[in-house]
Image: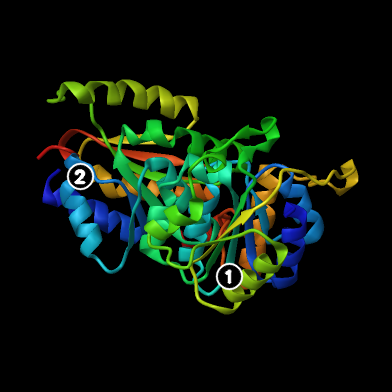
Amino acid sequence: MKRYDCLKILSNYVKDDDLVVTSLGGLMDEWHNLRPSEANLPLHILGVISPLSLGLSIALPKKRIICIDTDGSLFLNIGALCTIGNEQPANLIIYVLDNECYECIGGYPTPSAGNTDIATIAKGCGIKGARTVNSEEQFEQESKKAFEGKGPSFIVCKIEPGTERYPAEKRIPWDGFELKYRFIRFIEKTEGITIKPPEERYDFRADEKKK
Amino acid sequence: MKESSAKLVVEGLKEAGIKLITCLPESLLRPLYKMLRQDEFFKFVPVTNEGEGAAIAAGAWLGGMKAVLLMENSGLRVATEALSRLGLTYGVPVFMIMSHRGEIGEHNWWGIAHDLTMRPLLKAMHIPYIIVRKEEQIKDAIKRSIRHITTSMYHTAVVLSGETREE
């Protein structure tokens, strides 16, 4: 199963309003091309993808949060699954794209290439519906269930290494700060809230009049 | 920590609009955890390490919910990678309150290094911080830190020290 084919299926389920937080690597540009949106937040921060998504799901319980994590990232902070299992966020769908290696650095194996089973760990943490999918058919079936049901959903996708290559004009052009601002402005617009307010302005004339 | 100091922290957090607490337990701040856990105003999320706590607090902040990561100052060492990337490469802020283990007068030998590493780490990450030594400074420090975060979109920290950490 290829990552790109999974993401292509997933892009059919994701609605305009859904927030999508992704892990790093080739995944970022693939998702950007399949679902270009201000509601995407690609994070160059291993170990932070799933817990940050939990924070979003707590802050915005009426919004659907889709977290596309990876095996290498999740293993850096595997304890986050305990917290997700305890919090049971109903609006959170977590995908773990498990290629069993650190592909960006040449394919060095992660623990899931050995004896570690991520879905079993997640179940042990109280994420009852955690499961592993090995084919596109299973991916489609479990995604349908996740998008129709109540979370937390947790789908480990066994994928083969491999990345789509894009020319410069099709790659993500924004750095972290711009990605952050696009993301929060989208939330402000769709939720009707203020996250980063304008600076304060002082009315000196009004003060003088008071005197 | 005295009950009176803990009460002031709770009041300060409420007045600053903090709703989410992510934390790891710490013996100096014991009365504070109890109060926060029992207060329905707050969403209290215990975490498995401080890096995870920083990430959850950052996610909440992105979603418009003000949050605090509450920890012993040694937790800063664990959270450094998450804080560096969230703050320095994305400008996603995390507000922290930490106890001041290792300040002059420390009782425990294992706590000495907590202060020695806290200050250079805060400096290395360019994190503005206030060391609070008197109870009357607590609420003002929290208020200023939150105002600063909203302006800078970067982390701030309040370090509970002096009489605010003593039994």
- Name the mark on residue B49: none
Q: Residues within 10 Å of mark 1 (few under 14, many from 20)?
A: many
**Secondary structure of residue under mark 1:** loop
Residue A185's x, y, as percent? 66, 60
Q: Name the quadrant containing residue B132.
A: top left
Compared with residue B79, is residue A143 higher up or lower down, i.e. above or below?
below
Compared with residue A150, is residue B109 higher up or lower down, i.e. above or below?
above
Residue B9's x, y, as percent? 25, 51
Q: Amino acid under label 1?
A: Arg
Residue A77's x, y, as percent? 46, 43
- Residue at image x 28%, y 21%? B113
Looking at the image, which is closer to me, B15 or B50?
A: B50
Q: Amino acid under label 2?
A: Leu
Quadrant in which the C terminus of chain B appears: top left
Quadrant in which the N terminus of chain B appears: top left
Q: Is residue B10 visible?
A: yes
Compared with residue A194, is residue A103 higher up or lower down, i.e. above or below?
above
Q: Are marks 2 and 1 in contact (CB under 8 Å)?
A: no
In the image, is B122 to the left or to the right of A110?
left
Q: How many marks?
A: 2
Q: Is residue B152 visible?
A: no
- Residue at image x 69%, y 56%? A182
Closer mark to the observer between disc 2 and disc 1? 1
What color scheme is it? rainbow
- Of all residues, the one furthest to the front in this rendering is A115
The Cα–Cα distance between marks 2 and 1, rounded to whole angstroms, is 35 Å
In the image, is A75 to the left or to the right of B19?
right
Q: Which residue is mark 2?
A: B29
Looking at the image, which is closer to me, B76 or B19?
A: B76
